[in-house]
Image: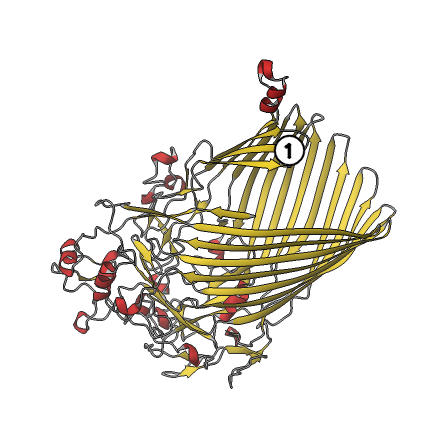
Amino acid sequence: TRQRNGLSGSSSLNLPLIPLDRSRASLGRAFTGARGARGGTAILADGSNINPVAVSLLNLKLENGQYVIPSPQQQVVGVNYAVSIPARYEENQYISNIDHQLSSANRLMFKSIISAQPTFQPLPAATIPGFGTTQDFKSRIMSLTDTHIFTPTLVNEARMGFSRLLGVVVPESKIPLSSIGMQRFNAKDFSDIPQISVTGAFSLGYSVNADQGVAQDTYHFADTLSWVKGKHQIRTGLEIRRYVDDYYSNNRFRGTLTMQSFGDFLVGLPGTPVAQGGNGTGFSNINTSSVASGVTARMDRITDTGLFVQDDWKITSRLTLNAGLRWEYLGYAVDALGRNGSFDTRRYVAPPANGATSAGFVQTSSSQKAIPGIPKVSNTLIDKDPNRNFAPRLGLACRVSNKLAIRTGYGIYYDRLSNQLGLLEALSLPGYVRTDLQGTANVAYSLQNPFPTLPQQGEFPILPQLYAPPYTTDRPAIGLNAVDPTLRTPYLQQWGLNAQYQVTQATLVEVGYVGTKGTRLANQRLNNQPLLATPQAPVNGQTTTTAANASLRVPYVGFSPTGLVWLETSTDSRYNSLQTSVTQRLSRGLRFLASYTWSKSLDNNSGSGTGATFNQSDGDQLRLGLNRGLSDFDRTHRLVVNFSYQIPNWGFGLKNTAVGKRLFAGWQLAGVSVVQSGTPLSILDTSGAALYGTANSRASWAPGATLATAQGSGRTQDRLNKYFNTAAFVRAGDFFGDSGRNILRGPAQRNVDLSVNKQFAINDKYSVEWRSEFFNILNIANFANPGGSITAVSYGVIRNTTGNPRVIQMALKFQF
């Protein structure tokens, strides 16, 4: 099969009012007096002090002749620029199925799927054109199943499988650093510009993950033996998976920069005194920066093993008990190249004054280029193997009467940590080093020289060292990912009670409760948050707490305040729901299912929704309990109705004729409708928590404001420019904000899809099927969540929609 889709990458921006003439003098007239978010040097009327890097970027053009930073489409303040760029997705797929009956008691089945999926994403990270990525993925999936019937009560099924995924992500085009006058230590190997974001205006450059590749093989074997003995149906078996995961990721090698305003972009100076060429504020116009260097190629090897036994015991004709136990070994990644390392806080010793230390760093026992003096630990970097994962399951089903059935059950389910863990381990010393600087830590850096100096790729692995302050470009405070050596396997407990009642022969009503609790869930925490210092409780010799000494008040000197990224399994979640449904089986041509769910999901960190992945927590990193709130994906209400209707033969007087039967018989109408609550959102303040050296704060409540006064009312389309009461929140200031996580909720969503089918029977051998599908047939605009950053011009404003407008597609299939 072959499939081609053209979706769209779109962006709506509040671009600064850039004049048509982009000369320094013209820019000076347009932005006279502009300065950074923290004040300082202002742009002169003649533009003579506009940063030359900013001037170069504003005048730089793409290969198609368009400016890298586009001009507004309307000379108005607010949303003045919108772009929609076609995305490309192609898939060529080849499917084969072979069934072979070796004997009456033995059957073999082989299946394979081969596909290629080249994709182009126009706006993966940037909000302006020119920085798309090409993603070329290929996959191979094969399976072989052997089913053997030994006796009528004893059957064995053996399954073997293999899958291969090959993928590479490549930037669309490259803009050399030299073309804008910017410098970076690794420009010889990675010559293009970093990702540059101006809050409330635009983002250009490539995503930190825009240059990577993977070759992943998975081998799978499973065997299940089923035995029926009296009232028992017993199943037992094993499952083994072997992952061979080779990859590289040039993560952050080009770097990232963020500036809080367009004025910061134009000035682009260090925070040193004006007399020394700075802006005089003590803060660089670069708010945050991140850059890395190293060798990230890895060959991870992971093995999973599972054993299980289960008994379905039919106690009586009305009562069935299901009991089972599963043991799982979900392995951690081991790099065959022996390049991984980490940082163990239990081994840390602070560096001496004006000196350096390697205390705390560890390397794997299989390190091929072992670094003298660095302790060796297990090849997984984790203290204990995950060999105690026992998962009992218990279920009970009772047929109370011929119309009523009740079911209940409980089970534990372990969730393997994603292979993201291996990649994050690769982004650590001794094979990789990163700096994450913010606020006063950036004081010495400008747009011309925005990054500290790190080792070149050819110098790795390096002796990992933490330097004592004062930090310099050659002795910077560093950043890396560190695996908690006490990491455990996440697991989920699930329980429920369900009742089914047959109202009529064709109608079934179902009401149930489902609850879950997640434990030891994956989390990513900034483990070097500065402590508050006072004369009575000094920190590292500091007796005062200021934004300027944030990097000196950290628990682990040598790391930046945001530099020690801790990978742990420390959070939990809870979910409770009422689930109801009405099912109408086929009756007079009509079949439908209506399902309604009322639910509430709470957690500390919702992850990405794609498995046990590590995602950054918000707010105070030492009090993750303050993050307790609605899950990012929580929807209080969700109603789904789907139906299909075989339209009776119509056509009035012609319906019984040969022509009438072909034209008016065989029509089918089907549809799906969804109505659901919106998802929650937090109010963030990227300028808050300055005393902690982070941009990871939520906003604070305004005096007298409550949740009731913060929520808006009325139709969504009437509140696009002020969805909620923006005055209910204020900037957090130097501390973390006191507003909770996910306290507001975005717009609800509705959608109706419809399809019409017709079967034309030509004769006994030939027929034609005509199919028409109407997605979002009512063309309902479903709005995205409003901007939640109090420092952004989009604060409280809904700029985008979710889902697609009405799409109509038709198909004709000839069958013979």
Q: Position of residue 756 (x, y in %)?
A: 54, 30
In this rendering, the count of numbered labels is 1
- Secondary structure at numbered mark 1: loop
Q: Which residue is mark 1?
A: 766
State whether residue 780 is above or below residue 328.
above
Please rate how many residues cluster around mark 1, counting C-alpha atoms within 10 Å: few if below 14, some from 14 to 19, many from 20: few
Which of the pair 645/756 is nearer the observer? 756
- Left/right of residue 767 with respect to residue 618 in the rendered view: right
Q: Does residue 101 appear in the picture of this structure?
A: yes
State whether residue 354 is above or below residue 689.
below
State whether residue 5 is above or below residue 651.
below
The residue depicted at 76 percent of the width and 50 percent of the height is 323
- Left/right of residue 342 with respect to residue 495 in the rendered view: left
**Mark 1 residue type:** Tyr
User: In the rendered view, how is the structure colored?
Assistant: secondary structure
- Left/right of residue 236 with respect to residue 649 in the rendered view: right
Which of the pair 619/310 is nearer the observer? 310
Task: Report which quarter residue 257 is drawn in.
Answer: bottom left
- Left/right of residue 392 with respect to residue 431 in the rendered view: right
State whether residue 644 is above or below residue 282.
above
Q: Which quadrant would the C terminus be assigned to in this image?
A: top right
Q: Position of residue 532 (x, y in %)?
A: 38, 66
Q: Residue furthest left?
A: 46
Q: Position of residue 633 (x, y in %)?
A: 50, 47
The residue depicted at 83 percent of the width and 43 percent of the height is 315
Q: Position of residue 593 (x, y in %)?
A: 61, 32
Q: Residue furthest top?
A: 653
Which of the pair 808/619 is nearer the observer? 808
Q: Does residue 604 appear in the picture of this structure?
A: no
Task: Report which quarter residue 735 is drawn in.
Answer: bottom left
